[in-house]
Amino acid sequence: AYVWSLDTRADALFALGRWEEAVSVLRAAAALDEDGQPNVSQVINLAFMYARLDQPVETRNQLAALRPETVSAYGHMQWVHAQLLAATALGDSVEITRCLEFMRAHQSDARVAYQAALVQTGRLEEAATVLISRLAAPEERADALLSVQRYDPAGVTAATPRSKDFRQQWTRLLQREDVLKAIREVGQIGSYPLRRP
């Protein structure tokens, strides 16, 4: 529980724009065992954090420490997703293609990660197909509807340039008529402003 408490603290610090502190806390969490085993979850989360801070080399350095046999199918999708973000920042088209092909073939292990990867690489047509299929599937619909709600329309939480890029692409995705139609068939989009304490 302690390692995940640190993970949550790091997320909170990151949202406040205290990025160096967030990295420090998550590095400490990544150094701890996870359920008595070498840590995987926080190492991957730390790699994502570096990716959001536009530090792709550090992202790759973190991921290089992982061994495939220690990572679950879901974790492997997260691992490849982080690799994709690093490759995108570095303009590594070969690695981008490899990562997307892997995620497409294994999307059932982490559909949300695959959808995010498509958005982050500007493949909005494919991302729309995934989101619409999630909205149509009863077992995925609640999570899909939750993801389209607007929790921070005023931009209260701090955003890195990479995060802003994702938000812009995500907004474009949600403005597509096919996506809006799919949402209207099962629910709606609400707006829930956040306020600093």
Image: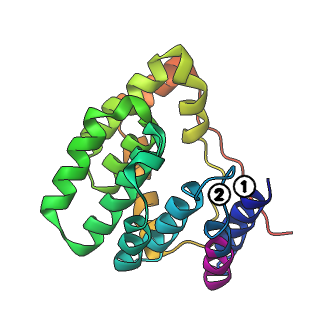
Q: Is residue 79 above or below residue 186?
A: below
Front position in the image: 78 or 197: 78
Residue assigned mark 1:
193
Q: Is residue 58 visible?
A: yes
Q: Residues within 10 Å of mark 2 (few under 14, many from 20)?
A: few
Which element carries disc 1, helix, strand or loop? loop
Q: Nearer the viewer, residue 23 or 29?
A: 29
**In which image quadrant can residue 111 be found?**
top left
Quarter of the view holding residue 105? top left
Q: Which mark is residue 152?
A: 2
Amino acid type of the residue that numbered disc 2 sits on in the rendered structure: Asp
Task: Examine the rendered structure and indicate whether residue 4 appears above or below residue 52.
Answer: above
Q: Earlier in the sequence, mark 1 or mark 2?
A: 2
Q: Position of residue 88 (x, y in %)?
A: 26, 66
Observer-nearest of 168 and 2:
2
On the image, which quarter does residue 131 sit in? top left
Q: Residue furthest bottom?
A: 20
The count of marks equals: 2
Image position of 31 (left or right of 161): right
Q: Residue furthest right?
A: 197
Quarter of the picture holding the C terminus: bottom right
Answer left or right for 101 relative to 5: left
Q: Is residue 169 visible?
A: no
**Percent position of residue 9, x then y:** 75, 67
Q: Is residue 192 above or below residue 161?
A: above
Front-most of 17 and 48?
Answer: 48
Q: Is residue 54 above or below residue 165?
A: below
Is 197 in the magenta? no
Whether residues under marks 1 and 2 lie with C-beta atoms below 8 angstroms apart, the answer is yes
Q: Which residues are magenta?
A: 19-27
